[in-house]
Image (spheres, coloured by chain):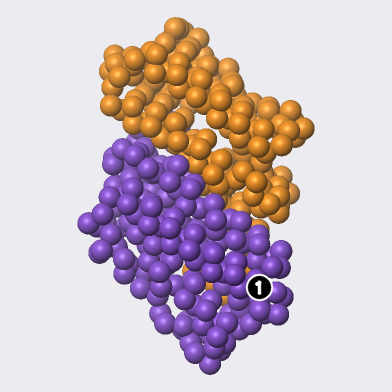
Chain colours: A purple, B orange
Amino acid sequence: MEQQAEQAIALLARTPAALDALLRDLPEAWTHRNEGENTWTAFDVIGHLIEAERTNWLVRAKIVLQSGETQPFEPFDRVGYMRESQRKSLGQLLDEFSALRNRNLDEVRGWNLRQEQLELRGRHPALGVVTMSQLLAAWATHDLTHLHQISRILAYQYREAVGPWKQYLGVLHCAGHGSA
Amino acid sequence: MEQQAEQAIALLARTPAALDALLRDLPEAWTHRNEGENTWTAFDVIGHLIEAERTNWLVRAKIVLQSGETQPFEPFDRVGYMRESQRKSLGQLLDEFSALRNRNLDEVRGWNLRQEQLELRGRHPALGVVTMSQLLAAWATHDLTHLHQISRILAYQYREAVGPWKQYLGVLHCAGHGSA
């Protein structure tokens, strides 16, 4: 496999354990609170990551491999799994995310991607032409976007509790950046 | 112990394992690159967290308990440990951070903090009067600030690789917020 793909997979493989270590059995005062109306809790974010494993990245990578630009990707339902996930515990969601991610990465590793495959093109419904290489990089950076978001959501719960320290704590001055 | 202190400790106890799961044995192309001149790598951030365990939060909490406002805190050297840490491996730093954090939290748990102690006051050299409760909350939020920063530093390495996906990936639009 090309080093570039291995590097993305190295990060993708670590995210479930990192989120598990951070969030499992953490009090709900941290995990089930959001940043205000129409924002997500850390619990919601894990539901979104599960949905992305089920219907977004791997599905699209397979379309790139099999059909290239001729078959545009389906739009991704960013909140699709959240309704279903509300009936589960955070521990269940973390288990589910980890299992799906492992299964998906096993499949990608099995493709043994070479430079030629990394240059294959697909068609994103809004972004236009994208490559397999960009898709793998975006999958990994999507994890980082949501780790960034979760650290901000958790910190938000302490925005008053830190008192005068607020000015030194950068995460409390992050208002988010578009989709997360 | 007051619930408020338990909640802060629940998060503080999880950070070393979360960073370990994310960063240990991750390729150096992720962990040893920064966001440009005079910025930190993920490796540097772990060195800073070690320094803060050694000389900042616990030391100051003890001053609040023992001397209150009469003894101002020493200023904290934000880059003090970085010089020393450059000779070590990331794995060694992660081990060291975990051991120091565990030892420090054991000490705090031993204080069995009640509401009365959480209201004790200390004097920060720049911020003025702060309480024990604010110190614990700031310690936890300092972890989140650096988790937020690490997710951003890692994502920065893929700012070009993601191609047109960049516009959807919030972390790539974060320029940092002051001290992190």
| In-front residue for pair A11/B134 | A11
| Quadrant the N terminus of chain A occupies | bottom right
- Name which quarter of the figure residue A111 lies in: bottom right
- Residue B2 in sight from this viewpoint: yes
What kind of residue is marked 1? Leu
Letter of the chain that mark 1 sits on in the rendering = A
| In this picture, residue B26 sits left or right of residue B148 | right
Q: Is residue A18 above or below residue A52?
A: above
Q: Secondary structure at mark 1?
A: loop
| In-front residue for pair A52/A2 | A2
Pointer 1 residue: A113
What is the x, y in percent for residue A70?
53, 92
Q: Is residue A34 above or below residue B43?
A: below
Q: Is residue B134 above or below residue B141?
A: above
| Quadrant the C terminus of chain A occupies | bottom left
Q: Residue at x 54, y 69 (%)?
A: A107
